[in-house]
Image (cartoon, rainbow, N blue to C red):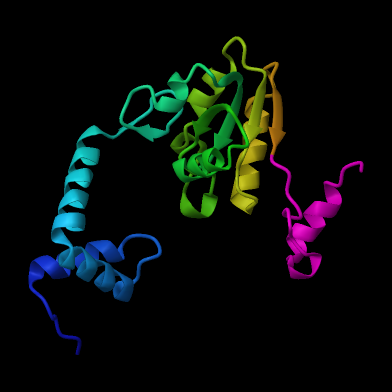
Amino acid sequence: MAQHVAGPEIERLIQLLARLPGLGPRSARRAALQLIKKRDTLLNPLSDAMRVANERIVVCSSCGNVDTSEPCTICKDPRRDASILVVVEDVSDLWALERSGAVNALYHVLGGVLSPLDGVRPEHLNLDRLVARASEPGVSEIILALNATVDGQTTAHYITELLTHLPVKVTKLAHGVPVGGELDYLDEGTLSAAIRQRTAF
């Protein structure tokens, strides 16, 4: 039977760290030990940063992004192309697109995808706000940047149907061979998508 090697406060810290994605019990123990060893330079500043973030973080009422201002930094940026809305499943997808620097548009976070097996229905997603934003004057394109999963594609089709009455162009991300990818290492689904969505050379 496993024995606790530290007091309940440290064990609680380890258990909470273990809940984070990518951290199992062993990684959480190592992280906790590192935090404890560097209390002044790591644990105390991290604790303070988490307290401040907890007090100030809000969900943007316009797009669904998380930030410390309302509306969020992206929605307030006048350099953004407000004619394009990029629809993403989650804030992590928004952040990934921002890191890539591939798009300079506004975003819309759905907060999930339709999933009958998990009980996620249209009313659970941020769809009403999406239709309202897509109806605003000046919006000309909706980019569906959803994952290439069954649920992601089902959601994309549902959104396309929702927006058919609006004069906006609905596009989706291309799927296929990644830049620098070798065909031999790709799965069959990626290869077939690349063939189906081939373009002129």
- Residue located farthest toward the bottom when viewing the structure as drawn: 1
The one of 79 and 191 positioned closer to us in this rendering: 79
Q: Residue at x 46, y 49 (%)?
A: 119
The one of 114 and 55 positioned closer to us in this rendering: 55
The one of 48 and 148 positioned closer to us in this rendering: 48
Indicate whether 187 appears above or below 80: below
Please state the horizontal and vertical placement of residue 39, each as a whole percent of the image.
14, 60
Q: Residue at x 47, y 32 (%)?
A: 126
Please state the horizontal and vertical placement of residue 189, each as a whole percent of the image.
74, 60
Q: Quadrant of residue 34?
A: bottom left
Q: Per the image, is 184 magenta?
A: yes
- Residue located farthest toward the front when viewing the structure as drawn: 41
Q: Quadrant of residue 166?
A: top right
Please state the horizontal and vertical placement of residue 129, each as a whole percent of the image.
48, 24
Indicate whether 136 appears above or below 92: above
- Residue located farthest toward the top when viewing the structure as drawn: 137
**Is residue 19 toward the left or the right of residue 165 in the image?**
left
Indicate whether 125 appears above or below 189: above
Q: Quadrant of residue 60?
A: top left
Residue bounds of the magenta highlight: 173-201
